[in-house]
Image (spheres, rainbow, N blue to C red):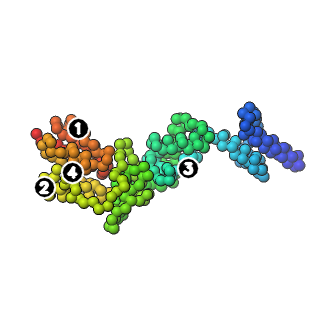
């Protein structure tokens, strides 16, 4: 019994000395110690729990060296998956995995497979691994694991909106600014909020709304910007805008018709959010017809056609 205790004590002391040498500034000395640690661990068949037991009661220097060694033992994919735990992973009803991440003090929401989330993960890996760069293969493997966990583990489900969202008695409008702020609208008016209780996504080409928003506007100003022939036409335009800004369907479709030069395309650009619903020529719809591509309520369902 005493012999076993002595052997374990000698083994503990040997490992502790090697751990300290493994993080030495002397590169040759550190490489030699790491190689010996790996060989010793393999020959004895020690698990991570066994290694932790050997560190019981170790001083701060040895413990710090042990933590650094074990950190270096992890595979890049495992490191990336651990780093991803800083994000709040959730899924939408269609099973797609998304992530809420903190960027410079504000929340951003991105698909797990998006370039934005991968970039965030790469930066965290670089900082955590003291300048090491994660390979594309390690990133893809980690992303696949995160997606699998989101699908088969108890992951919360949330809806992700584009530009506008309706929640109970409130409507939220994404400002699309760098701070991911939003406008909250209710029966008492509107205000800018730093973080909305809903999640918004950003698509390529989306531009910020005018910031900071200004109170005291008047819908009559719309008259000078669009070509509304009658008062009823203006009322229809306003009703259309309110319909798409309510944050819940069904949504209206607005058709603008008129001869060439009637400012249909100009009206489309004015009524559309910045960077969205650009007029595009649709050859299948006839010789002088333009339609906007519609992907969401605020990529306005507008159609402009020139009468022949």
Location of mark 1 (residue)? 281
Q: In this orientation, which residue lies closer to the viewer: 123 or 219?
A: 219
Indicate which disc, 1 or 2, sits on the residue closer to the N terminus: 2
Residue 51: horizontal and vertical position, in percent?
A: 73, 45
Indicate which disc, 3 or 1, sits on the residue closer to the N terminus: 3
Location of mark 2 (residue)? 230
Q: In this orientation, which residue lies closer to the viewer: 225 or 23?
A: 225
Residue 262 found in image quarter: top left
Residue 259 found in image quarter: top left
The label on residue 225 is: 4
The label on residue 85 is: 3
125 displayed left or right of 223: right
Q: Is residue 146 above or below residue 231?
A: above
Quadrant of the drawing holding the C terminus? top left
Write the residue at 18% across / 48% down.
256
Q: Is residue 31 above or below residue 262?
A: above
Indicate which disc, 3 or 2, sits on the residue closer to the N terminus: 3
Distance (Cα) linking label 4 and label 1 = 23 Å
Indicate which disc, 4 or 3, sits on the residue closer to the N terminus: 3
60 displayed left or right of 221: right
Q: Secondary structure at mark 1?
A: strand
**Which of labels 1 and 2 is toward the front?**
2
Distance (Cα) linking label 3 and label 2 = 57 Å
Considering every residue shown, the one lying at the far right of the view is: 2
Write the residue at 31% across / 47% down.
274
Q: Secondary structure at mark 2?
A: loop
Distance (Cα) linking label 4 and label 3 = 49 Å
Q: Secondary structure at mark 3?
A: helix
Disc 4 vs disc 3: Cβ atoms closer than 8 Å?
A: no
């Amino acid at each position: 019994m005493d012999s076993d205790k002595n052997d374990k004590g000698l083994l503990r002391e040997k490992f502790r000395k090697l751990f300290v040498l493994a993080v030495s500034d002397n590169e040759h000395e550190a490489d030699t110690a790491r190689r010996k640690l790996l060989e010793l661990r393999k020959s004895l068949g020690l698990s991570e729990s066994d290694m932790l037991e050997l560190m019981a009661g170790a001083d701060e220097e040895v413990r710090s060296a042990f933590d650094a060694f074990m950190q270096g033992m992890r595979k890049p994919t495992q490191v990336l998956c651990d780093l991803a735990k800083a994000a709040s992973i959730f899924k939408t009803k269609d099973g797609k995995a998304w992530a809420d991440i903190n960027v410079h003090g504000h929340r951003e929401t991105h698909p797990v497979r998006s370039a934005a989330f991968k970039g965030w993960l790469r930066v965290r890996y670089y900082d955590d691994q003291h300048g090491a760069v994660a390979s594309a293969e390690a990133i893809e493997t980690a992303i696949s694991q995160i997606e699998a966990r989101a699908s088969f583990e108890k992951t919360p489900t949330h809806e992700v909106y584009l530009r506008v969202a309706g929640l109970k008695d409130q409507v939220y409008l994404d400002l699309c600014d760098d701070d991911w702020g939003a406008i909250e609208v209710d029966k008492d008016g509107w205000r800018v909020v730093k973080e909305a209780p809903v999640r918004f996504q950003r698509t390529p080409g989306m531009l910020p709304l005018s910031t900071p928003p200004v109170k005291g506007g008047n819908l009559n100003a719309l008259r000078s910007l669009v070509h509304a022939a009658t008062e009823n036409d203006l009322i229809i335009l306003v009703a259309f805008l309110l319909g798409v800004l309510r944050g819940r369907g069904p949504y209206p479709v607005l058709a603008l018709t008129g001869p060439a030069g009637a400012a249909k395309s100009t009206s489309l650009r004015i009524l559309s959010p910045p960077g969205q619903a650009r007029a595009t020529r649709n050859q299948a719809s006839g010789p002088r017809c333009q339609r906007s591509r519609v992907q969401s309520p605020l990529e306005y369902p507008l159609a402009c056609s020139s009468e022949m």
